[in-house]
Structure formats: C-alpha cells, structure tokens
C-alpha cells in the first residue's frame, strides 16, 4: 500500500514536467535573418507574392515557402553559408530568381541581379534609352562609312 | 510581361534560342544594312521610346502591374522583323544593365513580345487599314498585346506541365492573370500609345508615318 502511494505521488509529480514539455518558448536574435524586398522597376512592391527560398545545403527542395508581406518583404534565417536562391513567382510571370551569398560570418551579398537605388527608377529609363541611342548611332555611322567606301 | 531567368527550363529556352538566332541574323542583314542608314535614326528613337514605355508600370487591382510593348509601332512602320530585332535589343539592355528578364529566356521573350505580337498586329493592320487607318492601328496594337500575352502565358503553362519546379502556377491561373489585364488595360493602352505616337510622327513629317 505504501509503495503504491509513493508511485502515485511520483506520477503526480511528473505531470507538470509533461505539461512543461509542451510549452512553446522563443528567442529573439537580432541580425540573423536575411530580409529581401522585391519590387518592380518603377518601385511598385510585389505584395503578397508567392516565394520560395532554397538552401545551398539542399537545393532540390524549398527551405522556406510563403508570401511576401504587404511591403514586398520576405525573410529567412540561413542555417548554412553559401549561395541561397530566392525565387518570387507571380501568376503573371513577373517575378525574380536571384542568389544571395551568405558568408560564414552571416554577412550577405547579392549575386547576379544589380540592385536599383531609389534614383534608379528615374535613371533607368534614361540610361536604357541612352544605351540604345548609342547603339543606333554606331549603326548609322557604320552604314554611312560603308556607303562612302563604295 | 516578359519572363525572368529561372522560370523556364532549357527544354523551352534552347529551342526558342535556336529559332531566334537565325531570325536575328536574317533580319539584321535585311533591315539594318547599308540601305537602312536613312531610317536608322527614326528606328533607334522609337526603340529607345519602347524601352522607356516598357519601364513604366501600370498598376492593376490585386497588387500586380503591367506595361506596354511599344514595338507594335515599329512593326506598322518598318515591318515585324524590325520590331523583332529592336525588341530583342531592348531585352538585351534590360538584362545586361538592369538584371530584368535575362539571357537564358531571351529567345522566349523576343519571340513572344518582339515577333509573334508585332507580326499579328502588322497582319491586322494590313487587313484593316483600308477601312480606317486609325482604327486599324489601334486594333493592330491591341491584337499585338493579346498575342504576346497569350504566347507568354502558354509558354509558362507548358513549363508548368513539364516541371512545376520552374513555374509553380498552372495554366488556367496564368491565363486569367495575364489575359484579363491584357484585354482590358494593356491592349487599349497600347492602342492609344500607338495612335498618339503615329500622330506625333505625322506632325513631325516622318516619311514612314505619312
């Protein structure tokens, strides 16, 4: 009888421990996440757009999937250094497939796609038009020189 | 409208490049040689304007946006092959300097936006211009946008069937997402832009627009 009482008491003492095992705790760790903002060439953000993030340690399956927030942000916490692939796909075919290099220190650099600054929205059409004008100016000069040589 | 790198697999991009490459060579030799010296400044200016109008996003309900093509005008004035080469140049500049679109998908985008759409618009213009030049130009621009959008949507739909890893959205969703704005907003806007540009060119007494 005494041993049964001790057993019941022991079980009763373990019940709170079992309850604690289901408690969800959290840590706040600043500076570990990589935040990416996606936007159109004129600065319009891609809000609520589906995205996938692929880890360099397992590039075959998405490490994270979700939707960008209303300001066009997505974020992930890398668990390995290397090139992390970020793919944002809208149903219209608009989107982005880029690589973000995560160093061992956690520092990130974007590979491939050049980032546009705030002035880029204005400068981009002008720069593009200037490049095209230069290409055609070269073609005109070439065509005239060939005509003159004939 | 144009597809970025990584959304379409080599099963589609390589055949598209294989079709585009000889067309670029043929079109360049035919339309950009010695005899084109007089028309090149106007073609260049319209290509630069096409780049600018493609950079301007038209916001749509639902948080997405669309943009004009701008090259239908080149097809109407100089033929679809000129539009094809000029749109390809626009895409190259976008990919090279701004990371938009990309080189692996250059053939797909050039065929859809530079050839199929402008070619359809040019054919519509040829068929309808006797009735009304302005109406024909508007209709041609509208049709060009629809054909380009449809081509891009079908490519993305085909990609989804081949491998959803590249493009996860099925064709019915892509078709609706692309064609509804195209029919209601982009097409009419392209038509108005084409009419406006033709009017400006006529006032400037540009020979091809008269």
Image (cartoon, rainbow, N blue to C red):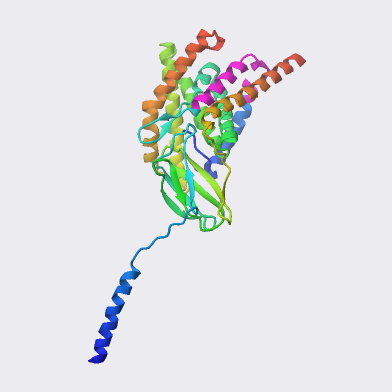
Q: Quadrant of residue A106?
A: bottom right
What secondary structure predominates along the stretch shown in magenta? helix
Rendered view: B140 above or below A121: above
Rendered view: A100 above or below B42: below
Looking at the image, can residue A94 be seen?
yes
Residue A32 horizontal/vertical position (percent): 50, 54
User: Would you say residue B41 sits in the magenta stretch?
Assistant: yes
Q: Quadrant of residue B41?
A: top right
Residue sitting at 50 percent across and 31 percent down? B112
Query: Residue farthest to the right?
Result: A149
Q: Is residue B50 left or right of residue B170?
A: right
Residue B54 horizontal/vertical position (percent): 50, 27
| Residues shaded magenta | B28-54
Looking at the image, can residue A150 be seen?
no
Residue B8 horizontal/vertical position (percent): 50, 42
Rendered view: B14 above or below A33: above
């Amino acid at each position: 009888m005494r041993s049964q009482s001790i057993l019941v008491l022991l079980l009763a003492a373990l019940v709170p421990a079992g309850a604690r095992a289901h408690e969800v705790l959290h840590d706040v760790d600043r500076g570990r996440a990589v935040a990416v903002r996606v936007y159109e060439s004129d600065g319009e953000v891609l809000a609520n757009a589906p995205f996938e993030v692929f880890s360099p340690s397992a590039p075959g399956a998405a490490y994270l999937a979700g939707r960008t927030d209303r300001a066009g942000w997505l974020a992930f916490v890398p668990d390995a250094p290397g090139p992390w692939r970020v793919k944002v796909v809208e149903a219209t075919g608009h989107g982005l497939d880029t690589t973000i290099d995560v160093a061992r220190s956690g520092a990130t650099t974007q590979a491939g796609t050049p980032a546009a600054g705030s002035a880029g929205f204005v400068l981009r059409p002008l720069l593009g038009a200037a490049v095209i004008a230069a290409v055609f100016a070269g073609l005109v000069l070439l065509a005239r020189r060939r005509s003159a040589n004939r | 409208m144009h597809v970025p790198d990584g959304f379409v697999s080599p099963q589609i991009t390589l055949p598209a490049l294989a079709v585009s490459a000889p067309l670029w060579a043929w079109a360049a030799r035919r339309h950009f040689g010695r005899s084109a010296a007089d028309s090149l400044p106007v073609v260049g200016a319209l290509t630069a304007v096409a780049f600018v109008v493609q950079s301007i996003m038209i916001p749509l309900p639902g948080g997405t946006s669309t943009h004009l093509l701008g090259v239908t005008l080149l097809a109407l004035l100089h033929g679809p092959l000129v539009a094809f080469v000029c749109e390809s140049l626009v895409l190259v500049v976008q990919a090279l300097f701004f990371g938009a679109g990309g080189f692996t998908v250059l053939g797909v985008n050039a065929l859809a936006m530079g050839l199929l759409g402008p070619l359809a618009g040019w054919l519509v213009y040829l068929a309808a211009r006797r009735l009304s030049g302005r109406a024909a130009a508007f209709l041609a621009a509208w049709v060009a946008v629809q054909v380009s959008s449809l081509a891009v949507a079908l490519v993305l739909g085909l990609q989804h069937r081949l491998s959803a890893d590249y493009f996860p959205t099925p064709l019915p969703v892509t078709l609706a997402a692309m064609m509804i704005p195209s029919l209601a907003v982009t097409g009419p806007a392209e038509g108005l832009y084409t009419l406006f540009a033709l009017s400006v060119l006529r006032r400037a007494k540009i020979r091809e627009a008269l």
